[in-house]
Amino acid sequence: MRSRSSPRTLVKAVALAAALAASSLALAERPGAAPQDMGATPAATTMTVSIVLKVRDPEALDEFIADTVNPDSGRYHRFLSVQQFRQRFAPSEGQIRRVTQYLQGLGIHVDEIYPSGLIIKATGTAAQFSQAFSTGLRDYDDEQGRRFHRPDSEPRTPDLLQDVVLYVAGLNTQASQFHPRSTNAQTLRARLGQALPAVVLPSGNGTATGVPGSYTTGDVAGFYGVDPLYAQGITGKGMTVGIATLADFVPADAYTYWSRIGLNVKPNRITQVRVDGGGMLSGAAGSGETSLDVEQSGGLAPDADVVVYDAPNTEAGFIDVFYKAVADNKVDTLSVSWGSPEIYNFAIPGISTDSRPVLVAYHQAFAEAAAQGISAFAAAGDSGAYDTNRSLPAPQFSSILTADSPASDPYIVAAGGTTLPGTIQLGRFSAPIPTEQVWGWDYLAPFCSSLGLDNNTCGIYSVGGGGGVSVFWPQPAYQRGVPGIRRSEPNQVWTYYPNYPDTSVQQYLYTVPANVKGRNLPDISLNSDPFTGYLVYSSTDGGWLTGYGGTSFAAPQLNGIFALVAQAKGSRLGLLQPQLYGMRGSQRGEHQGESGNGSSPGVVDVIGGDNWFYSGIPGYEPGAGLGTINAAALVRALPGRRNDD
């Protein structure tokens, strides 16, 4: 568990971004209908932006974080308050004042400076921001008729602020590419005339159903060694779990779920914090996603408080939701189940602008979280090793091996997916799953073939747990020397076929850099396959939903489980990966409660299945990562606070 060296991830990101900027990028127009240019944004248009400031001394911050999870360090679990973080790692008060005075000198109103000192919220007109950052702004209507504005050239930070300003978010208000990482098998079942499985609720005094498709948090507690913690009175009391989301939700949904599965929770345990006005309340906008996040995390830690941070699904919203949650410093664990392909940030013409600084902006928030002891989790995606397929699906686009963001960030635990053992039944077809395996629906390929369908037409390709290699974030210290860690693969060329199935006409989009020694994901996985999936209650989606899955479940489940582990250890846990990777090599199969010999450090290998490219093998692989967990064994293995604390 000893950290061998500082990750230096912020320092290396700057150099890597510069190297990648020289990569060959596409010259093609955006596939499909382009937004309609409605002309220059009226000069008097009011807008609010988020100015992200640079962390001061990022190398020292990386070293501090490494020390907080090194049991041999005097800093072990000595986390910072927000004020301490600001004093040590935020820009100086003089630097911040220089930014605010520059804005005010142009007539821009400074609304708020986040307590961490890393975000300045400011409101002004289009003309004022155009002058401030040397760019014009234009209005567009998207395919749904929604009006937005964005810069007509790359915004430029003035020379006097180059040392302090990292990124300006909010000049582009286009709906973002972020999507919730949940899914079901409804389309696949419909081909057989099958309905989704019936809703089954727990009976008797238990909270588990034991029925695939209707699994609850009570079942999860049994699968992953949580029940022994409950028996010891570890239920999340005194802890707070946080949810970062891009959609509003109905809190009554979560209370209904907990009540109906037999959990007795305190009323008013949920607090909502609406960031930048909050997310939309609509099933289509993902409010069901927020419901399942709250239900899963709060169900596994039934006595914990829950704080939901919801923001609009925009670039600025996704940045602000993390900075706000971390700057409040109220939550002990934090999860997010939204994401997009990492390469969308690599200036693919017509699809994205060069927004690699956005990845660094997220990273600063996760670094602050780690320094303050907050453990963070992100869904790794539901399109297997081919992450772009979820948003721009094959076969009109070539499949390329890609990773999901923000799960690819080295300071957030990437939550992957598995399939639980059992027999998957579709009509007369059955697929035996002998042991828990990496989730990938290629095990259903024989079923599709029996219907005369290829994998694309059948709808199974490339559904599975996300995983792969980042081509932005370098390999972190905790993955060095770990067998099974991979580099990015060669020959990953992203191409669009506008006249598919005629592939003679193609548009080149992007070539993924090969042989990059990047951060591998996921780190830890839990059951995410809809065929061995879960119940959700969402009033905006019709009430009880069954047969749901996706790594959107794994992330909040880990959120709740590690809140319990933190309670048991009497301290926040901070950055988890150096601790988890130090526990690799545990005995396989130690899932159920205390069934092992007591010596396992709680990380359970997964050696079957695949996510369409990476197969489950002994040790680490970018399919299930390190594997799954045994929560009770983790509590035994993790060192507690030092005696002199």
Image: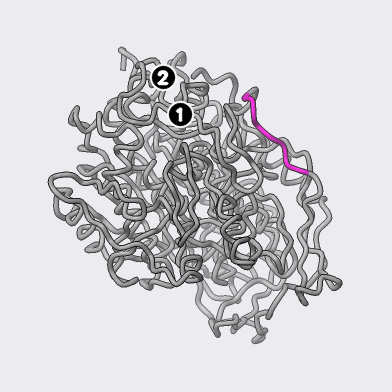
Q: Position of residue 159 (x, y in %)?
A: 70, 54
The reply to whether the magenta stretch includes residue 483 is: yes
The crowding category of the residue bearing disc 2, from other C-alpha atoms within 10 Å (few below 14, some 14 to 19, many at least 20), is many
Q: Residue at x 30, y 63 (%)?
A: 198
Vertically, is 507 above or below 216?
below
Q: Residue at x 65, y 80 (%)?
A: 35
**Amino acid under label 2?**
Ser
Residue 455 in view: yes
Q: Are marks 1 and 2 in contact (CB under 8 Å)?
A: yes
| Colour approach in the figure | one colour
Badge 2 is on which residue?
600
> What secondary structure is found at the residue carrying circle 2?
loop
Q: Position of residue 526 (x, y in %)?
A: 44, 42
Q: Nearer the viewer, residue 643 or 518?
A: 518
**Amino acid under label 1?**
Val
Q: CA distance from mark 1 to mark 2?
A: 8 Å
Q: Nearer the viewer, residue 539 or 429?
A: 429
Residue 616's image quarter?
A: top right
The crowding category of the residue bearing disc 1, from other C-alpha atoms within 10 Å (few below 14, some 14 to 19, many at least 20), is many
Q: Which residues are magenta?
A: 482-489
- State left or right for residue 378 relative to residue 13: left
Badge 1 is on which residue?
604
Q: Position of residue 42 (x, y in %)?
A: 59, 84
Q: Position of residue 112 (x, y in %)?
A: 42, 58
Residue 104 in view: no
In what quadrant of the picture does the C terminus appear?
top left
> What secondary structure is found at the residue carrying circle 1?
strand
